[in-house]
Image (spheres, helix red, strand yellow):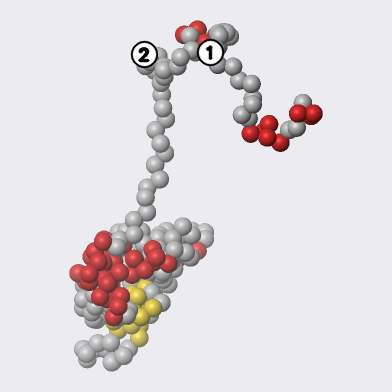
Amino acid sequence: MLIGSISSKKPSFAPGLHLLLSLTVMKPAFKERGAGSEASQIRSLAGLEMFTALEELIVDNNLLGNDLLLPRLPNLHTLTLNKNKLTDIEDLLEHLADVTPSLVYLSLLGNEACPNQLVSPDKDEDDYQRYRYFVLHKLPQLKFLDTRKVTQKEMMEAQARGAFMKVVKPKSEAPPKETRSESQPLPYTPLPRGSRDAKNHKGVFAKCRYIYYGKHSEGNRFIRNDQL
């Protein structure tokens, strides 16, 4: 899905003209035709450089990833990238700050870059709020983010601590397998050397200095003498 809106002051465009971008113009952005819904989903926005007067752009439910590149769109004020494949929030925001100086409405719901419980069950409301602070730190001109209006309190918090609010998901790395070579010494044990090998185990008998009679056992508190 890709919908654009152009309002141009040039004679060739009528004010407020709404344009549905042609699939022919966006043809390089699509994968090869094939079975399944992915055949008609956009992977890049190549071709948008012909629409520099674009004011609104909706590219929800596509396959746009971290390699997303937009041309400079000085009039773009609304951008929705819901349900795509965006994971790197910092690179995306730095790119938008550079090419969309007039952006005031942004929505990134449904992407891994936007931590919410709909996409990431391991995230909570605190993670999402930290994400909002980080986005507002990078794009301070925003008035509306995702489904909520930006508040004055959020903007003050973003200016003060937004740079440190990036939500980072720890990488899951499998712990290295422990390989014990024959040259490495075995852990210390007071048992004789012959009893350390599980394949060649030998019983060990020895005298003990202490004898346990069980008189201080917790279980003995509940047993009467006539039950012994």
Neighbours of disc 1 within 10 Å: few (<14), some (14-19), many (20+): few
Image quarter for residue 151? bottom left
x then y, percent, for residue 23: 38, 72
Q: Residue at x 41, y 24 (%)?
A: 179
Neighbours of disc 2 within 10 Å: few (<14), some (14-19), many (20+): few
On the rendered image, what quadrant is the N terminus found in?
Answer: bottom left
- What residue is pinned by disc 2? 183
Q: Earlier in the sequence, mark 2 or mark 1?
A: 2
Above or below — where is 77 with respect to 206? below
Question: What secondary structure is marked by label 1?
Answer: loop
x then y, percent, for residue 161: 25, 66
| Residue at the far front in the pictured view | 225
- Tell me the CA gap for discs 2 and 1: 36 Å
On the rendered image, what quadrant is the C terminus found in?
Answer: top right
The amino acid marked with disc number 1 is: Arg
Residue 44 vs residue 177: left or right? Answer: left
Above or below — where is 2 with respect to 171? below
Q: Residue at x 41, y 27 (%)?
A: 178
Using the image as rendered, state which of residue 40 and residue 226 is in the foreground: 226
Question: What secondary structure is marked by label 2?
Answer: loop
Is any part of residue 139 visible from this angle? no
x then y, percent, for residue 177: 42, 30
Image quarter for residue 143? bottom left
Using the image as rendered, state which of residue 77 and residue 3 is in the foreground: 77
Residue 228 vs residue 46: left or right? Answer: right
Q: Residue at x 48, y 65 (%)?
A: 118
- What residue is pinned by disc 1? 209
Residue 30 vs residue 75: left or right? Answer: right
Image quarter for residue 68? bottom left
